[in-house]
Image (cartoon, rainbow, N blue to C red):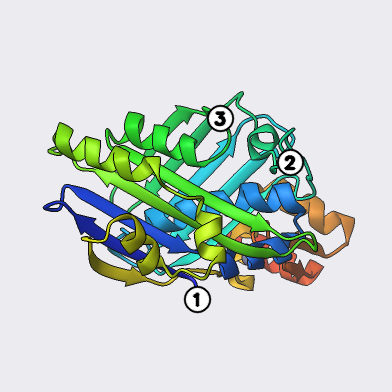
Amino acid sequence: MKDEIAIAETWDGLVRIHAAVTTNMVDEARKVHDCLATSAAALGRTLTVSAIMASDLKAEDEKITAIFNGHGPAGTVLAQANGKGDVRGYISDPHLYMTRADGHLDVGGAIGTNGNLTVTRDMGLKEPFTGVVRIQTGEVGQDFAYYYAISEQTRSVVSVGVLVEPDGSVSAAGGLIIQLLPDAGDDIVDKVEEVTKHLRPMTDLIHEGLSADEIIMTCFPQARILAHKPVRYCCGCSREHYHDALAVLRKSDLEEMIAEGKPAEITCAYCEKKYVYSVDELKEILQERCGTSEK
Ligand code: ZN
């Protein structure tokens, strides 16, 4: 099944539904970062929810950044998604394999609960909006539901999952977000609760081959599909980007690098691509800096 996000509404538009199939995107992230199962699940769930959030953005260059800093062994888990459907991210420790007593991957234990989930919506010209909430379980889905409730005053159900095969590959990944608009009354709340009571794990549905549309229709047969959005793992970094990053370093740092006489090697945190800048290039960057600013 191809990766895709479907957006739908039901019950007079009082309930909005997003479903995402992200198997290929998450497997690509797993390969890029050489993730073991628990790290793949923690990163994959965060990438998936961020991608769903970004599917509502109006412009291609607007972006959502979600960061878990739970002080667990996973360290920082970061995902960034833009209005084009390009998603990228990283996890401090990609090599975690942790299971719970019931045999499931211990994503909550890996992320930890001693810290915050921070979500930043960068809407281009406007000031970015940042919401910060305490991590509740570290299982990702519940944490984003809590974020929606506290930071955006939106009641929601967030179900997200990543299935990792014994050989380490990701065979199913995706998510479902159900949101109630502020005007939704108790009757709608009851109906949504009835649906979520019978909700099966996303990984089961996707493993069975359901598309994003079919996931929505299974839960809400009367829903109206409004839009489809693409989703893929794509970093989008370039030599120029990291050239610019070097150009904003302190003058003394650049001088130190030049004095060492070794090329500067930068590894992109999102795609692990290496960029090398020769001493001559570093000198040029230093000269450009001195030409445009005083220090
Ligand atoms: Zn990159």
Q: Is mark 3 within 8 Å of ligand 1?
A: no
Q: Say which residue appears at 56% left-offset and 60% top-offset.
A: 173
Q: Position of residue 53 (x, y in %)?
A: 38, 53
* 80 left or right, relative to 84: right
Q: Nearer the viewer, residue 39 or 68?
A: 39
Dot 2 or dot 1: first in sequence order is: 1
Which SS class for mark 2? loop
Q: Nearer the viewer, residue 203 or 20?
A: 203
- Residue denoted by label 1: 2
Q: Say which residue appears at 67% left-offset and 29% top-offset.
A: 71
Dot 3 or dot 2: first in sequence order is: 2
Which SS class for mark 1? loop
| Distance Cα–Cα, label 3 vs label 2 | 18 Å
Say few, some or many: other residues with alpha carbon within 10 Å of mark 1 (under 14 / 14 to 19 / 20 or more).
some
Q: Say which residue appears at 28% left-offset and 50% top-offset.
A: 126
Q: Is residue 235 something that shows in the picture?
A: no
Front label number (2 vs 1): 2
* Type of amino acid at the residue the image marks with label 2: Gly
Which SS class for mark 3? loop
Q: Nearer the viewer, residue 89 or 98?
A: 98
User: Any mark on residue 137, and which?
Assistant: 3
* Type of amino acid at the residue the image marks with label 3: Thr
Q: Is mark 1 within 8 Å of ligand 1?
A: no
Tell which quarter ligand 1 is in: bottom right
- Residue denoted by label 2: 103
Q: Is residue 72 above or below residue 246?
A: above
Query: Based on the displayed image, in which of its 4 quarters is residue 198 positioned?
Result: top left
Q: Position of residue 73 (x, y in %)?
A: 74, 35
Query: Based on the displayed image, in which of its 4 quarters is residue 197 positioned?
Result: top left
Whether the residues at callouts 3 and 2 have beta carbons within 8 Å, the answer is: no
